Image (cartoon, rainbow, N blue to C red):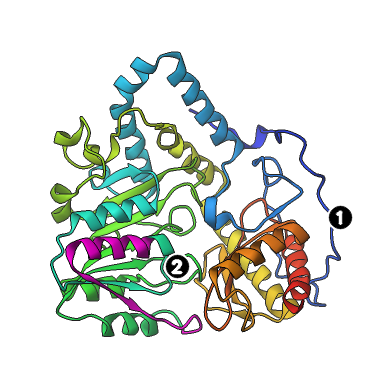
Amino acid sequence: MSHNIWMVEMSTPGNPRPAPARPDARTDGADGADRPAPLRGSSTLFTLDPGTAHLNHGSYGAVPVPVQRHQARLRAEMERDPDGFFLEAPDRIGRARAEVAAALGGDPSRLALITNVTEGVAIALDSVPLGERDQVLVTDHGYGVVTRAAERRATEAGAVVRCVRISPHAPDGEAVAERVLAAVTPRTKVAVLDLVTSPTARAVATPALLAALRSRGVVTVVDAAHAPGALPVDLGGAAGGADFWVGNLHKWAFAPRAAAVLAVDRPWRPRVRPLVFSWEHDRGFPRRVEWRGTFDYTPWLAAPAGFALLNRIGAEQLRAHNDGLAAHGQRLLVERAGLRALPELPGLGMRAVRLPPGVAEQEHAAKALMVAVRRTLDTRIAVRPWQGGGVLRISAQLYNRPEEYLRLADGLARLVTR
């Protein structure tokens, strides 16, 4: 099906608030030459409330209009003939999976479509045998619920979770790998690591680290929630160098929520345990993981439309735009709000900064700051509690503008001081 992304008109439901007046367009007193120009289609492809600066794409994504409409057609088809839709669904899922696999450089037999990374990590942990006193390795930059899933699995097996603490300001690459490898013991069975950390937007599960862990006999589970669409992905051969690799499609690949992919290396595929037993169980991986009866499969079936749109825009061009805009926003937060930049992953449309000591150091305080930024600045951000000063993360996507980050930087300076 052809998706003409340039002929779509904005059709925001309801009566959104008018956009606030644009602030002074100055950046730091310079000419603002680092600000990327808006890309074609940026004002027509989304139905986001224009009265809010949505600087948190990395959390929930935003579904473009053509993909919304494609999913709506699928849902209408399902309601016209539920019996026929569900009868054909397993084969249609397989075809959608093949298109997603082609976009990610992988083999469809190595991938399964799932709802999100949290589900994929739970499947992986449930598929790996653990015994008493075995160790599951995580880092303090991991996504909170993923870490809790590791803790639950370890508790059930009599194993323990060992958390590797990495300074938010430590450089990426070898320094991070050394910290992780130093924590490995003969009892370490599984390492759950982020390709891109959610709170701090930095790299952990590099190919070199994954290879080193594999050579030590450690099973690797990679949380690649932010990879599809945001970074070049090649799942050829093994599962991205990991035993289990999980990436969301509804963040940066323009798929509807909730859609994700679980890639499993060959030795583990027969041992994968789905969270739900189904009529497709005896078909093996990946069907035993994908089928779950009367489930809404339309996000998966519409996921290829998201990749088609991404390619139509130009994936490399969009990534460069997002990376440049995120870097611009981080610079404003540093120079105008006095915050400290954290190491970044080049090419990614997310950046993080450190808040001052005493600010957002606990969960309730981090949430309170997000609420205050929403109420006073009409801006959405992500804040993660951290001892010594919380971590604030911004995202950049096609629909964002430089002045939105300026509004955040100037307003945040006042909020944090107050």
- Say what secondary structure mark 2 lies in: loop
> Quarter-wise, where is residue 352 in the image?
bottom right
In the depicted view, which residue is nearer to us: 288 or 98?
288
Q: Which mark is residue 197?
A: 2
Give the image location of residue 206, x and y in percent.
Answer: 35, 71
Type of residue at label 1?
A: Ala
For residue 11, what is the image quadrant?
Answer: top right
Q: Nearer the viewer, residue 102 or 220?
A: 220
Q: Which mark is residue 227?
A: none
Q: Is residue 44 magenta?
A: no
Going 30% across and 54% down the picture, which residue do you hit? 122
Q: Is residue 4 left or right of residue 78?
A: right
| Residue 332 placement, left or right of 103 | right
Q: Position of residue 374 (x, y in %)?
A: 71, 58
Residue at 69%, 40% in the rendered image? 44
Tag 2: amino acid: Thr
Query: Residue 169 magenta-drawn?
Result: yes
Q: Is residue 204 left or right of residue 69?
A: left
Taking 407 as reference, is 248 above or below it?
Answer: above
Across and down, in percent, residue 134 comes to 17, 72
Which residue is drawn at the image coordinates 65% and 63% (left, top)?
A: 370
Residue named by callout 1: 21
The span shown in magenta is: 146-170
Question: Is residue 87 positioned above or below 204 on the image?
Answer: above
